[in-house]
Image (cartoon, helix red, strand yellow):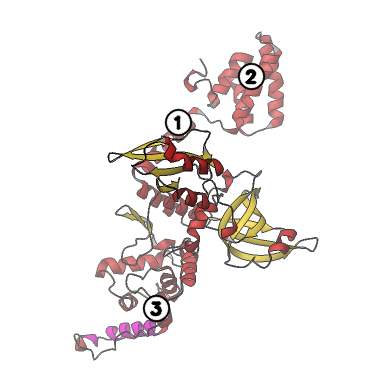
Amino acid sequence: GVLKETYGVIVYQEQVMEIVRIVAGFSLGQADILRKAMGKKKIDVMEKMKAEFAAGAESNGFPAATAAAVFDLLLPFAGYGFNKAHAAAYSVLAYKTAYLKANFPAEFMAANLTNEINDPKKFPIYIDETKAMGITIRPPDVNVSEKVFTVSNGEVVYGMVGIKNVGSSAVDEIIRERTENGPFVSFPDFLERIDSKIVNRKVIEAGIQCGLFDALHANRGELMENLNALVAWASRRRDFRASGQSSLFDGTDEAIDDAPITPFPEWDSTVRLQYEKDSLGFYVSGHPLDRFRATWENCTTLNLSRPENASSERSYSVVGMLRGVRVIISRKGTPIGVCSVEDFNGSISAVMFSEVYEANREVFLEDAVIGVVGKVEPRNDEYQLVIQELRLPDELEEKEAAEVHIRLEDTIENEHDLCGLRAVLYDWTGGSSVFLHIGENGSETVVKATSQIAVSSKRQVLENIRRLPWVTDVWKV
């Protein structure tokens, strides 16, 4: 009856205490000593209690082998056991958070992003998780963003306090001015209205770099190039108004010239994206790997947001960008390449030992988009990719999809018509199950091919299938 409510599994500390009382006749005090020893993994105390347990069990008529087996069954409990009240409280909390994530996903993730906003390790993980849930993260907007992450029309709006180099007092000043006197209508209007002692130049530069003012002026390069002149203009404008002269000239253009903005080219996408990543922790207007996305989807076998799920026994492929590239010298005097590999899902630290480095040094370059082959190993409570080879992205082998789907023409009449398709499927065997989509009177029937037919999902194979008679489309899942 002790384990009835947990279906025969030891879950609660109270169950351990009750078991040792029944089997070995322990007092509540002895049982509590064992519970504490297990919880804190005190081996010496547990060994002493094991002897007492064996003696008590024997006196209660239990064979020595049975007593030893019961005690050994209790030991693994030390790794996960809690008292019942603690477990129940956490179960309620787990249910509530699961309910919120399922029913209010945007609000749930906005709250988590706010909570982890100052943790450089956890914050990118929550950004990736939000995107993986299909939730759009809108970049900071000087007229929309609040201090923390909020939700608007099902989308998460980036909180201004999450921008690097933008402090809490500066955010409070921006929101105060916006609330009291309405939205900012232009970038010069923003500069004129805010308190420049609180919202200083460093804050403004960070805002430009991450796109905070894009709704007012989309050309970030132009804003940064004109910032000195615009700040000086805004200062003169505030001084002019403070002197009381503005009332003499309101409605005229005699007071101060219009804000000086000299045309200047926008930053190229590489500079723009790097500023976004540095300021916000993620890319907003694109990704440096965008033109390699198809290759990344077809060839990458390691999820960089979940490296803990990787096996250390196999090699993985990643289409990614090399960051923080540097070379260190080992104690043996040999060069070792060190960097991080970054893709759409996240990043991972990587190392390339001397032999591999020497073979790949010409392509081991900062910001290089490259195909990386390597193994994942745990290191200092984190994970590291040990690079075995660098290739051009297109030279990586394509990963096999779980399924290949083939849509056939409605006019197909008999099995003979499928002989060409069958031959190709047998010639290009692989690991993907085959599903045939057959149309009939406007509807479609999906038939799974026999398990003896498994085809490769590589692009060339799919193209060969697509060119066959009776085939109208083919795709992989």
Q: Nearer the viewer, mark 3 or mark 2?
A: 3
Q: Does the segment drawn in magenta span residue 242? A: yes
Q: Nearer the viewer, mark 1 or mark 2?
A: 2
**Which quarter shows the C terminus?**
top left
Give how far apart the Cα atoms at labels 1 and 2 are.
25 Å
Q: Label 2: how many residues lie within 10 Å, few (<14), some (14-19) or many (20+)?
A: some
117 lies left or right of 138:
right
Q: Give the residue furthest to the top.
A: 61
Q: Give the residue furthest to the right.
A: 332
Residue 15 point in image, percent of width and height? 54, 22
Of pointers 3 and 2, the one earlier in the residue sequence: 2
Residue placed under numbered mark 3 in the picture: 223
Q: Nearer the viewer, mark 3 or mark 1?
A: 3
Type of amino acid at the residue the image marks with label 3 = Leu
Give the quadrant of residue 214: bottom left
Q: Give the residue furthest to the bottom.
A: 254
Residue placed under numbered mark 2 in the picture: 70
Element carrying mark 3: helix
Residue 88: mark: 1
Type of amino acid at the residue the image marks with label 1 = Ala
Q: Nearer the viewer, residue 91 or 173?
A: 91
Magenta stretch: helix, strand or loop mostly? helix
